[in-house]
Image: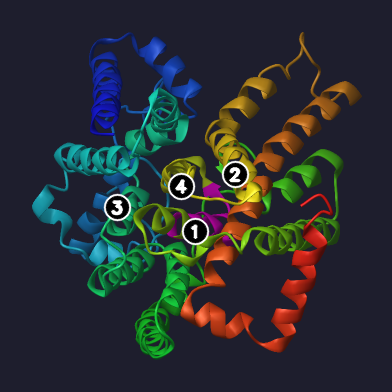
Amino acid sequence: MLKYRGYLAAIVIVYFGAVILFWLHGDPAMVGIFERAQGVPPVMGPWLYQPYAHAPVPFIDLVGIFSWRECYLQGIDVTLHNPCDIIPRGPANYSPIVWHLPTEWLGLRNPIPAAIALNSAFLAIVVFLFEPRNYRDLAIAALAILSPPVFYAVERSNLDLVIFVLAVGAMLFPQRKFLSRLVFYICAVASGLLKLYPFALLLALVREPVRRFLALSVLSLVVIGVFLSDHWAFITHLVLPKERTSGMFGGKIFANGLQELFGLSDTGRAVFYLSCCLISAAISILIAARIKDDSKFRDGLDRASSLLLCGGILVLGCFFSGLSIYYRAVFLLPVLAGLLSLRLSFHSSAMQKLIPLAVLVTMLCLYGDRMRALGMALLHPGVIEPSSAYGVGFATVILVVKELFWWSEITILAGMILAYLIHFPVGAEFFNLPVFRKRIGSCGKAAISPAT
């Protein structure tokens, strides 16, 4: 395993080293083509349109975060406007805690060292996530780490990388020890205070005995309640990034895309989204009922299971909390690492069939937006007229395929997470209630074919 992990580290170092050299010495137009191929949009600003994203400085998201602190120290209310930012992105739209952090010691006008340190920590954790045992695992891990979302995240140095380092880094501590799990819960709360979606990780509290679960839940709710009460007015008026079907993922994209293509009403869009959620939930329950008896689900505190469980919860949190810019798909990496490590640990035929499918779908999600972009590139006059019936049909097929990747991923993950939760102390108490025991039992019987 160490040999293949060494190969993986070498691949990552060589690739990103080559990218840095390309950035520094390559032709700007060619750099722009490369970055757009990775899904990184050019930066718009007072200097007009740049052919590549990292002009005039790289790591533009971290630059924006530092600018909030700079303006805050000058007494400017960054929730209203932010004149310290080098590009006009409007007021701050993250948690107020961000601009209260003492980041000035890092050098507010020189974010490059901080970004290099953050990116290095992120890539080190990503490499350490994977435990390749053969060249097949190595190839899958390398393709995942070199995927467009990873490049996008590194190029932007968004706050999501800080959350990744905190939350995913904490997953790597031995989760069989309560102290390690406590560190993970603290990191989950800290991450949620930076951006709200990581609060979903507190679902992992069900791993604890009932009394400890209640105590930690109450403590977490108190912290979250104090935070929300202090900043409720700001949070409810956040100006979020404009929703779009390209360069993003999330549960609402499918319905939004169909609304754009066919002019669905807002009610029709809501009904379609709700239908997708209900169908996904029903299939997830069937999957959980089919696989829950595999003995491996009774041991949910090992390294691989923790990555799959907690990584899956984080992905579900991103998917259903709103639309996420595609670099947030980096949270699929712990899921993929867990799936690869657990591939030989499950004994039931259902899981032996489901794991390869889950790995494939995860990889398709990592590359899904680029596949969508390549297809949509054909939609322009002279190739396929976008407004024609054929053009609309072609765009619909692309949308449906990409969203099926994501809804399949979410459904499979939800089924696996549910299969784990059933065996944890709190989950066992909850699902042992008569109403759930009867329903899950009937689902399990329905999911088992006569041949098995």
Closer to the chain start, of discs 2 and 1, is 1
Q: CA distance from mark 2 to mark 4?
A: 10 Å
Q: Nearer the viewer, mark 4 or mark 3?
A: 4
Cβ–Cβ under 8 Å for marks 4 and 3: no
Q: CA distance from mark 1 to mark 4?
A: 9 Å
Kindly identify which residue carries mark 4. Answer: 342
The residue pinned by badge 2 equals 352
Q: CA distance from mark 2 to mark 1?
A: 12 Å
Name the residue carrying label 1: 296
Q: Amino acid at mark 1?
A: Lys
Q: Secondary structure at mark 3?
A: helix
Residue at x 44%, y 25% (from the top left corner): 136
The residue to which callout 3 is attached is 162
Give the amino acid at mark 3. Answer: Val
Look at the numbered discs 3 and 2 and tell me whether their residues touch, using CB distance below 8 Å: no
Would you say residue 319 sits in the magenta stretch? Answer: yes
Q: Is residue 239 visible?
A: no
Q: Residue at x 44, y 87 (%)?
A: 210
Q: How much space separates mark 3 and mark 2, taking CA atoms? A: 34 Å
Q: Which numbered disc, 4 or 3, marks the residue that appears first in the sequence?
A: 3
Point out residue 278 in the picture as x, y percentages from the top left corner.
77, 63
Q: In 3D space, how far apart are the residues under numbered discs 3 and 1 (Cα atoms)? A: 31 Å
Secondary structure mainly formed by the magenta segment: helix
- Closest to the observer: 139 or 388? 139
Residue 72 point in image, percent of width and height: 24, 62
Q: Amino acid at mark 2?
A: Gln
- Distance from the alpha carbon under mark 4 to that under mark 3: 27 Å
Residue interval drawn in magenta: 310-324
- Quadrant where the N terminus sits is top left
Helix, strand or loop for disc 4: helix
Could you tell me which secondary element the residue under label 1 belongs to? helix
Q: Position of residue 96 (x, y in %)?
A: 33, 68
